[in-house]
Image (cartoon, rainbow, N blue to C red):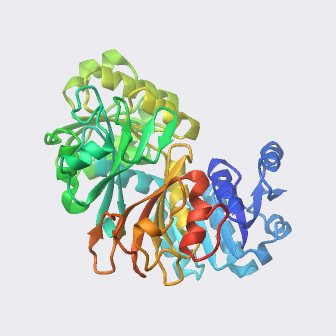
Amino acid sequence: MNILIAGGGQVGALLARRLIREGNAVTIVDPSPERCAELEAQFDARIVTGNAARVLALREAGIDRAEMVIAVTDHDEVNLLVAQIAQVESQARVKVIRLRTHEVQHWHDVLQKSGVHVDLIIHPETELAESIMRVIRLPGVSDVHEFAGGAVQLIGMSLEAGNPVIGRTLERLSADGPPADSLIAMIFRGPQVIIPRGSAVLAEGDRVFVLTSRASAAESMRFMGLATPAPLKRVFILGGGQLGIHVAQALEAQDVRVKLFERDRARAERVAAILRDTTVVNADGTDEATLEEEGAADVQAFLALTKDDENNIIASMLARRLGVSKVVALINRLNYLSMVQRLGVNTTVSPRLAAVDRILQFVRRGRVLSVTTFRDEEAEAIELLAGPESRFVGKPMREANFPKDTVVGALVRPTGEVIVPRGHTVVQAGDRLIVFALERMVPTLEAAVAGRAGKGA
């Protein structure tokens, strides 16, 4: 497939890397000659130096031949113009753009009324706010990802000192009687990503991902040694940007007392005018004395959501030291993610990974329903539809010969039944497979599900 990507930043580069790996012909347009030189050194792709808001630049990039157009530049105006130009200049079957403006819904309506068809408009702040709201009430839980319309949940948690599951093998845990529809699907141990087998031993500091049905989620967390969460009453937010405002408004709607810190006075005044019940403090939220004076030790959650990764990391570590049980940090630089988690900040959110995950479900093979990326692209959770042509259909799991370094965490039947598969479980056409894989195995897995021979299959 011919794919044109407008914008060669981190998101554009991540997408290009995946799409090239899967055999697509990718062209990247970026205005910076220096960045284009870097991209040419990294990728087997066509790199065009130019402003994607210019028709001539997109024509040079071959927009007339593009089957898919993805606009992820740093400027909303450029991304909107790319969509308009593609509507006229290309026959692209799929168009995707990223917008950061808070007017995203208004722009959706304008595009629709003007006849510009866009398949997906990504608004990272909305995606991240939803992610934060899923975990904010759950100390010890780093992530909650949903599959099959919410019927299946993937819960990430850190094993801290004193957790009773530490030192046990997965076989021993299984014998202790966990919920039948739950499974430990992945373990992050320092820089290592483990797709575990029964002999794997859980260790202090491990970040463990448990797959479970929604109905068994609370029981699964108790089984893994997590305490029942206390009611959420007070939350501190650092940063008065769009994300901080979105989360504060969501918490206000749930009658949670929120205090938001914004060091820029003019911005603090604007935020105070927007938020109805939130206390806005014009102060530096990375200052320990300020946090202590404002009562950080008594809050249930601290959210560091500024645009500055370093400030978010510092503030999060201060909040941990002050005893806050739930700390969330916004991290833009992907190479910081694993480091931040090793520093004890268990919950991180990344606008770039959120954008990439949403886009990939549009550009992967037709059987891919959703994609979730972990850390610096080291592992993925993929929701796949097993069609009648798949070589797994009609076989018991023990005979299906799934690729190495992959594990099927759950099957969801067309009836909605959630099954954690065992060796005798037979894959049926129409099943949703939720599969965990190391990044290098994803093309082989997708080819097998699609019924095509893949390298290493």
The answer to whether residue 6 is above or below residue 222 is: below
Tell me: 232 left or right of 319.
left
Using the image, determine if residue 364 lies above or below residue 438.
Answer: below
Q: Position of residue 203 (x, y in %)?
A: 35, 31
Asked whether residue 312 is in view, the answer is no
Q: Quadrant of the C terminus?
A: bottom right
Number of numbered discs: 0
Where does the N terminus fall, quadrant-wise? bottom right
The residue sitting at 38% across, 43% down in the picture is 244
Q: Quadrant of residue 16?
A: bottom right
Q: Residue at x 30, y 52 (%)?
A: 134
Q: Is residue 415 above or below residue 104?
A: below
* Residue shown at 65% from the left, 65% from the top: 70
> x, y (%) of residue 316?
38, 28
Question: Which of the pair 13/375 is nearer the observer?
Answer: 375
54 horizontally vs 227: left or right:
right
Side of 389 relative to 161 (left or right): right
**Residue lying furthest top in this view?**
289
- Left or right: 415 as drawn, with respect to 73: left
Residue 107 visible to the viewer: yes
The answer to which quarter of the image holds residue 172 is top left
Taking depth in this image into account, of 196 and 171 the one nearest to the observer is: 171
Depth check, front residue: 414 or 264: 414
Residue drawn at 54 percent across, 34 percent down: 336
Q: How far across and down, in percent of the image, does residue 90 sit?
A: 74, 79
Depth check: 357 or 284 in front?
A: 357
Residue 401: percent from left, percent from top? 51, 65
